[in-house]
Image (spheres, rainbow, N blue to C red):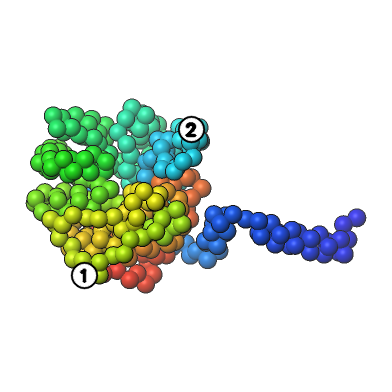
Amino acid sequence: MFTEMNRRRFLKRSIAAAAGAAAWLSPEEKALLAKTFPTSELKQTNNLPTGKIKDVITSRIICGGNLTSGFAHSRDLIYVSSLLRNYFTDDKVFETWRLCEENGINTAILRLDDHVIRLISKYWHERNGNLQWIAQVKITEKDWKTEAMRAIDNGAIGAYVHGGVGDKFIENGRVDILGKALEFIKENQVIAGIAGHSLAVPMTCEKEGLDPDFYMKTLNSGNYWTAGPRQPHDENWKPSAGQIVEPEFLPRTHDNIWSVTPQQTVEFMQNVKKPWIAYKVLGAGAIHPNDGFKYAFESGADFLCVGMFDFQVKQDVTIAQNILTGKLQRTRPWMA
């Protein structure tokens, strides 16, 4: 019989065992435990704020598409993409998108490929979904039309040039091709954007007078242990469209490969009068949403593109709601 005395002994031993186990936790595990955000502290407001990119009403949190396409910045974990492809069956993708809609997320940023087109078409026409699709497209020097047209023909309400492609065109001095892609997308009556991991992308586009409807630029604080040591930042640095941007983290010693100039990005974007969708805001899962969302919104981002598992959607939205309806210390005006 499980007596009261036995129950007390059981609890005492369990507590002692837990304390002993904690002593053997790795630094990563201890960090995760320390950053766990109790769900009980979240206040559900049922009203995720929105903004506008031209005439498109967009939720401040946008559902990212890499996870549902089986891609992730998984550092040196070689099994992650296979795990994602097996987890995100059609039904699981639809469940995730439905949860997004039920919690106030009305837009997803998704890749452009046969898999995504099949999924979004099926979701709209067979599952009665209403999620808006902004498509990630790739261009070449000879063809800046084909992928954008395919996205538009398949129902995308917007298209933007892929971040890695934007980086390369700026690096190669071909901002003119980015301009041609923008104008073509705009001519087809959908919102048009340019993405970049490098801060040189928006800097050059602004200098050359390109007129995107929105920018996508990576942003996170780098405040996680694998991001590596920071380089000393010049306190006299002033943003300039023609200035070469140097990483703020020591080269080849960090894993924060997509947001290496957070401070300079924040300072430069202060004066950019275009809506800004920030992405990679959680450092591929290394930063808790409570910290990553607050940092990105306070730093000036108008929208956040966030990859989410189905079981993360409600908590992510609630965290964003609490941040956006709380005392947000934001200096950049809302541009959308």
**Label 2 crowding class (10 Å Cα cut-off): few <14, some 14-19, many 20+?**
few
Residue closest to the eye, 295 or 124: 295
Res 47 visible: no
Q: Label 2's element?
A: helix
**298, above or below 55, in the image:** below
Seen in the image, is 45 located left or right of residue 57? Answer: right
Residue 32 visible in the picture = yes
**Mark seen at residue 284:** none
- Residue 216's x, y, as percent? 26, 49
CA–CA distance between discs 2 and 1?
A: 46 Å
Q: Residue at x 21, y 70 (%)?
A: 236
Residue in front for this viewpoint, 129 or 296:
296
Front position among marks 2 and 1 = 1
In the picture, measured across the screen, residue 110 lies left or right of residue 175, that is right
* Category of crowding for the residue at label 1, using alpha-carbon neighbours closer than 10 angstroms: few (below 14), some (14–19), many (at least 20): few
- The amino acid beneath tag 1 is Asn
Query: Toward which corner of the image does residue 133 lie, by quadrant?
Result: top left
> x, y (%) of residue 12?
79, 64
Secondary structure type for disc 1: loop
Q: Is residue 321 left or right of residue 15?
A: left
**Residue at horizontal 25%, vertical 47%?**
196
- The residue lying toward the viewer, choosing from 158 and 76, is 76
Q: Which residue is mark 2?
A: 82
Q: Which quarter of the image is occupied by the C terminus?
A: bottom left
Question: Going 18% across and 66% down the picture, which residue do you hit?
Answer: 238
Disc on the earlier residue, 2 or 1? 2
**Residue plotted at (13% across, 29% down):** 142
Task: Give 241 or 254, whichever is nearer the viewer.
Answer: 254
Residue 236: mark in rendering = 1
Where is residue 89 shown, x and y percent of the image? 48, 32
Q: Position of residue 205 (x, y in %)?
A: 14, 50
**Amino acid type of the residue tagged 2 in the rendering:** Ser
